[in-house]
Image: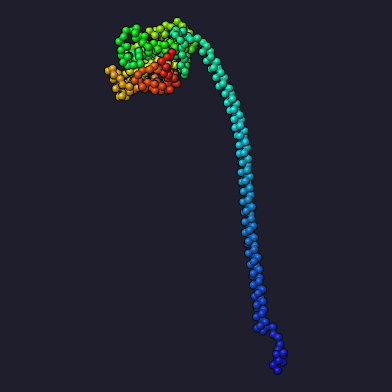
Amino acid sequence: MSLRKSRNRSFNPFNLSFLDIMSCGLGAVILIFLILKHGDSLESDQEKLISFDIKNVKESIEKSLEKINSKNSVISKMQENIANENYKIKKIESEINTQQLLKDSIIQQNKDIQQVNRIKEDSMPDVIEISGDGERQYLTGLKIEGKRILYLFDSSASMLDENIQTIFKLSFLPDDQKGNSEKWLRAKKTLQWLVARLPSKSQFSIISYNSSVQSHTNGSWIKADDQELISQTLNSALDILPEGGTNFEKALLAAKAMKPQPDAVYIITDGLPTIGEKLGNFSISMETRRCLNSESRGRISPDCRHILFQKAKDEYLKGNKIKTSTILLPLQGDLRAASDYWNLALQSGGTTISPSKDWP
């Protein structure tokens, strides 16, 4: 009975179950529509952002490429400049090598010329003849050269002998015995040897000095080819006798006062000065003044002799320096003489020697 009733029930599309189903379907369709619409919008924004980024990257790449091209251009120019500079350097090095070869050639030619000149000079006779027994010996390292040559000849009492006591005894002997003392004869032979070795085209003068100075050419220059004047000048210097103290400063001042000045000075002496010039007292030290006062009283210490030498040397080396060489004869007790005269030679470009007793 109930089955029959259910079969006879008619279908109503607007009942509750049907409406529920339709509502769910409609909601699903709307939801799908919303999802699809939102996805399209999101994808479009991302594309714009990506396109913008791509555009920026492309612009950045283009700018970077422009910079790279610019840098490459600069590098190319720098490489070109480097190549040019390397070429110049090689050219300069080649010129330097050429100049060095030329310089070496000139130096060798000069050496050859000097060797020839030395041979000629050795073969030339001395400007004067020196009499005596045996052959004259020549000093190694001492060469007489210059256009105007001045000889400073120490004629103080110490040139009589090496020993202080012997000097004191000889100073009271007659003049002929003083003139024949061994050391004084040796000093005179040294002066003769130096004059004999004058360059033929030079000029010379001789100044002897003790407590005073004496020019044996009256302050003028004598030509080395004037035999008569050379003999007169040399004899004038050889005729003096050793006496008095040693005023080395006065001798150097006389040398610098010559007109024109000498370009080479040769000193024959045996030690440091015992007398100094009192000129310029306002600028000298108290120690130097003490030494000047002590020598005036006849007493002079080795230290004071050194100080007087330094005072004379410093004044002498002011301004134009003159090449100065020294032949240092022996004197007992004057221990600082060798080093002081060596320093004078070193500062002036000269030579200092202390020859053996058998020279010249």
Q: Is residue 65 left or right of residue 331?
A: right
* Residue under the point 66% across and 83% down: 17
Q: Position of residue 343 (x, y in %)?
A: 41, 23
* Residue under the point 33% across and 18% down: 274
Q: Position of residue 188 (x, y in %)?
A: 40, 11
Q: Position of residue 98 (x, y in %)?
A: 60, 26
The residue closer to the viewer here, 225 or 179, is 179
* Residue under the point 39% across and 19% down: 316
Rendering quarter of residue 325:
top left
The residue closer to the viewer here, 293 or 153, is 153
Quarter of the image with the N terminus is bottom right
Rendering quarter of residue 262:
top left
Rendering quarter of residue 173:
top left
- Is 358 located above or below residue 3 in the figure? above
Q: How is the image coloured?
A: rainbow
The answer to whether residue 139 is seen in the rendering is yes
Most extreme residue toward the left is 297
Q: Position of residue 165 (x, y in %)?
A: 31, 15
Most extreme residue toward the top is 228
* Residue under the point 72% across and 92% down: 4
Label tally: 0
The residue closer to the viewer here, 334 or 2, is 334
Q: Is residue 150 left or right of residue 211?
A: right
The answer to whether residue 240 is seen in the rendering is no
Quarter of the image with the C terminus is top left
